[in-house]
Amino acid sequence: FGDSTVPGVVEVGRGDWLFWSAYLDPDCEALDEVVPPTMPGADVARLLVTPPKAAYHADRLREPESACVAEARAGLVDRFGGLTREVDRALAALLEQGIEVFIPDDTHWSMEARLVVARSIVEALAPGRWDDGAVTAGQVPRLSGLARLQGIAHSDLVEGPVTTLDVNVVSDQYVALNGNLLILQHSESGAPDPLPGVTYIIGDSQTSYAIPLIAPYFEDLRFVNWFLVEGFGFTGPDWPAPDRILVQTIEDNTHLLQSPELASFLARLDSTVGD
């Protein structure tokens, strides 16, 4: 990539690595103040905050982040604990095996990391149901958003993990925002013995790409992209009460955890628990 860059958007790292500038060098005091939101009365409720690319691939940066960043990130992971700590350790374990956690020219997890996170989410919400034998290699979209910002195009498909279990996508509703398609997805499992009840996942594009691996394990899965909650409020149909819910966001967007839109959405779900 040389030294070419998109000012204020893409940071060129070492070799063929690119970084989203906004995710670099976060405000350490702001990270120190992030606290988990109040969750609804679902039988199972989980929070997942995922560190950004630089947290795992700092050696690929040309200039290091501020000295306080690593400690602030570690403190955030410790405060959230649970699934956040578990996923962080699982991703760090990939690095120890020499496996990249992020795609070099994109902001999303590598295929191996995507599989690790999907397994962790399923095990957190439906312990004992994940089946490694149901994962095989297939063709999945090639994510290279940062490279595309540099004017470099890649093939549309690459080899990645897919599931052999069946899932029926009941509905996809798309909202256009800055050229992106934001998903509100309702899936029903066609796999044998899915977990009964209604499962909600509120997350960003990181989680959305893992949903095909997650959905078969749940009888009724509702995935809501963050921007439908935070950017627009939730104005869709009255969905049933959650039996379990997961809220995921990246470190840079942890402020969304305290947003009134999320609080309103969670209160709406909570108000129907036990009906």
Image: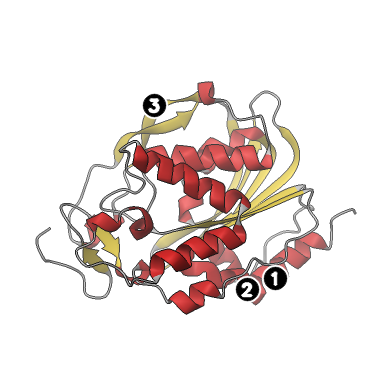
Q: Residue 3, labelled with which disc?
A: none
- Residue 258 at x, y percent in the picture: 63, 73
What amino acid is found at the position of numbered circle 3 in the picture? Ala
Side of 15 relative to 84 (left or right): left
How far apart marks 3 and 1 lie (CA) works out to 39 Å
Side of 219 relative to 178 (left or right): right
- Residue 108 at x, y percent in the picture: 38, 52
- Residue 79 at x, y percent in the picture: 60, 62
What amino acid is found at the position of numbered circle 2 in the picture? Gln
Q: What residue lies at 56% left-to-right and 53% top-to-bottom?
A: 84
Residue designated by label 2? 258
Residue designated by label 3? 137
Q: Residue 263, labelled with which disc?
A: 1
Residue 227, visible in the rendered structure = yes
Give the mark, 2 or 1, whose residue is nearer the N terminus. 2
Residue 231, visible in the rendered structure = no
As displayed, is residue 49 above or below residue 230?
above
Name, please, the residue furthest toward the top. 133
Q: Are marks 2 and 1 in contact (CB under 8 Å)?
A: yes
Q: What residue lies at 34% left-to-right and 36% top-to-bottom?
A: 97
How far apart marks 3 and 2 lie (CA) works out to 38 Å
Sort mark 3 into few (<14), some (14-19) or many (20+) by Cα contacts within 10 Å.
few
Disc 2 secondary structure class: helix
Name, please, the residue furthest toward the left. 2
What amino acid is found at the position of numbered circle 1 in the picture? Ala
As displayed, is residue 249 above or below residue 142?
below
Sort mark 2 into few (<14), some (14-19) or many (20+) by Cα contacts within 10 Å.
some
Q: Are marks 3 and 2 in contact (CB under 8 Å)?
A: no
- Residue 34 at x, y percent in the picture: 57, 71
